[in-house]
Image: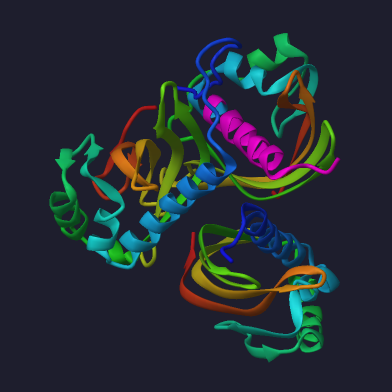
Amino acid sequence: MPLSVEDRMAILALVTRYNHAVDEGDVDTRSETFTEDGVWDSDTAGVVTSREAIRAHAATRAPQAHTKKHWTNSPVIEGDGDHATITQYLWLVEIVEPRRTLMIGTYHDTVRREPEGWLFAKRELRVHSRIDY
Amino acid sequence: MCYRRPAAGGPRVSLSVDDRLEILDLAARYNHAVDSGDHEGAAALFTEDGAIEATATGTIAGPAAIADYIGSRPDGWQRRRHFNNNAIIEGVPGDEDAATLAMYIMVLSRRETVLPRLLGRYEDELRRVDGEWRFRRRRIIADADAASGRRAEG
Amino acid sequence: MPLSVDDRLEILELMARYNHCADGGDGEGFADTFTADALFEGSMSSARGRAELVQVIASGGGLWKHWLNSPIIEGDGDHATAKVYLVRTGLGEDGEIGLVASGTYHDTLARIDGEWKFTHRKVHPDQ
């Protein structure tokens, strides 16, 4: 069964919820965007497996929050039934005056429909460049 | 220029949610194709009579010419990243297979320090061919282009 | 009744139209995105009601552009709230094109005569 319009909007809303949660240092909401067996694999944090481990990892990063903004863009969503993938760009703006950094990367996400809605089963973040400006 | 809603009673065609999401998907696929160096893939998102129109280069018409154009950019599109924003999608009165898309474009360089490289606006005409939305005409209006050292007036 | 997918897309397009009008120097079009008695609290100016809102937009921006991201839209029936990221691009102090400001919009919206409009829009700047 192809993804419905409602599915696509719900998947985009999941990405948005993650962006706000990570930027606000909201450890619970961030980890709850993952499935219980979710995997967070990034060039900045390595591979973190399970929601609990992601929560613990997020807690170590939370004090740095409020200086960063995650901007995702150009999502291409493909899937059917209860599984989908998203390929999208990340533009991470970090402001710690007077230093400003822009990081460009790509997310390769796998999402799964769970009883509580669409959640990340795996997020991979590949970083392409960091630029101070 | 401002993309205002036509006055009440004027021609205004609402596209379905499905159509609007498919058109956003088309715009995203163009960015991914161009930025990964897939020139043929980007050109395939245009109709057979599709064209790109840019102030600096004039009109480039047809998929083969479009693929050549995208592949021939001086320092390679592969090191760039296209970001869109503020999409306004509208139907065309009397033609259910046509639509327009107005949105912002920012091209970020992945390595250089001048950010962003290009800032401007797309004004696109779209056509549905065999059930798939395609670019019929993609007009690029650059407000600033760091590559050419030019800063156009708004 | 919860917001439909259609409502969400219409609110996103209202936000887009606000930016096109603000950056294109169209005060009337900008004011059209608000209800008649709406309150706008920007980082540099405030305005209440149509006559003041039209005056917020002085001239066409060119390089000055508003970019939005990560909208969270909630609501039901004819009322909604939204939280959305904003950056503005323009010429920086060094004369280079870049990101000159960022922040978050906090919005309240209402559907009037079938169209979504802002009733209150407030900018919370990052800097």
Q: Quadrant of the N terminus of chain C?
A: top right
Seen from the viewer's position, the closer of residues A94 and B120 is: B120
Dominant secondary structure of the magenta stretch?
helix
**Residue C111: x, y in percent?**
77, 26
Question: In the rendered image of this protein, does residue C45 appear above or below residue B66?
Answer: above
Task: Answer with the quarter of the image where residue A129 lies.
Answer: bottom left
Q: Residue at x 39, y 47 (%)?
A: B131
Q: Is residue C85 rendered to the left or right of residue C89?
A: right
Seen from the viewer's position, the closer of residues A15 and A116 is: A116
Q: Residue at x 36, y 55 (%)?
A: B30
**Residue B15: x, y in percent?**
53, 34
Q: Residue at x 64, y 14 (%)?
A: C55
**Residue A12: x, y in percent?**
64, 58
C3 magenta-colored: yes
Task: Answer with the quarter of the image where residue C80 lies.
Answer: top right
**Residue A28: x, y in percent?**
85, 73
Seen from the viewer's position, the closer of residues B40 and C59 is: B40
Question: In the rendered image of this protein, does residue C113 appear above or below residue B97?
Answer: above
Q: Residue at x 75, y 88 (%)?
A: A50
| Magenta-colored span | C1-21
> Do we see residue C58 in this rendering?
no
Q: Is residue C69 rendered to the left or right of residue A31?
A: left
Q: Is residue B128 rendered to the left or right of residue A121?
A: left
> Do we see residue B6 in this rendering?
yes
